[in-house]
Amino acid sequence: MTTFSEQFPIVFQALNVGFLQTLKLFFVTLIGAIPLGLIISFGSMSRWSPLGFLRPYLKNLPKDGKLTWWQKTQLWFAVDFRPIRLIVRFVIWVVRGTPLMLQLLAVTYGPYYIWEVPVARNKLIPVVIAFAINYAAYFAEIYRGGIESMPVGQYEAAEVLGYTKAQTFIHIILPQVFKRVMPSITNEVVTLVKDTSMAFTVSYQEMFTIGKQISNSESSFMPFLVAGVFYFVFNAVVDFVMGRVEKRMSYYK
């Protein structure tokens, strides 16, 4: 049986390779999930109604609330039926309501079982897709909460100053939203660091997967301890960086 001093260099070197794969998965996921989450949040707040043109015809409905079921149906389709919002929020509900592990399996092996598409040799692609969609759903809800919390008066003031809707959102609203939601984003980013270990489900060679393989071959728990130290240090660095970013944005009160 090999001693700790003999095992450690081998384990450390092997986990370094896995750590690089974990870093790659983390950063590519983050680059995809943050902007995708913002786009999804726009969809979840969409006010577009394909039957909105019917609203002028509903002005003659009774004002006392005594409407027939047909009138109520017309009113709902004309005012509250927003298909983009309904579809996007349903997708968010499904993504947030199912395990990430199941989503990894579905994205990686689903195309093979449904359309007989060969499983991708580079597991990074389906893993990143699954992670990006999952975290984009959470980021979308964070963004939506931040955007909807902004006072209406800021939009009105910007309109008085001659700003367009796009200028108002990009230059006034969005910086304040990021300031407000930064603690929640930091929490999700830290969680992402730990969730990368779930990629072992589809045999992606990240740090936890390699640690598990070494542990089984050496009958030792040490690879998991070393991997735990890697994750802890990585999380500490991420938390420090996100804290610095939050302080840099502290001028948005």
Image (cartoon, rainbow, N blue to C red):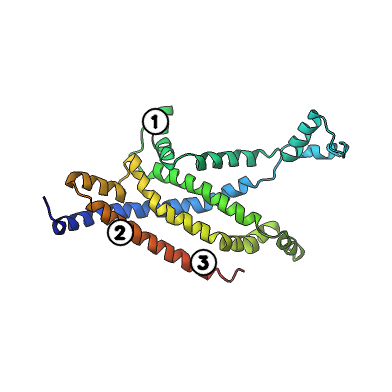
Amino acid at dot 3: Glu
Q: Which of 44 and 208 lies nearest the eye of the viewer?
A: 208
Q: Secondary structure at mark 3?
A: helix
Count of number-bearing discs? 3
Numbered tag placed on residue 246 in the rendering: 3
Amino acid at dot 1: Tyr
Q: Where on the picture, by quarter, is residue 85?
A: top right
Q: Position of residue 112 (x, y in %)?
A: 39, 30
Name the N-terminal-most of marks 1 and 2: 1
Q: Earlier in the sequence, mark 3 or mark 2?
A: 2
Pointer 1 residue: 112
Image quarter for residue 167?
Answer: bottom right
Q: Which residue is mark 2?
A: 229
State which tag comes first along the sequence, 3 or 1.
1
**C-alpha gap between disc 3 and disc 1:** 43 Å
**What's the residue at 42%, 32% (across, down)?**
111
Asked which secondary structure carries label 1, the reply is: helix
Q: Is 114 rendered above or below residue 15?
A: above
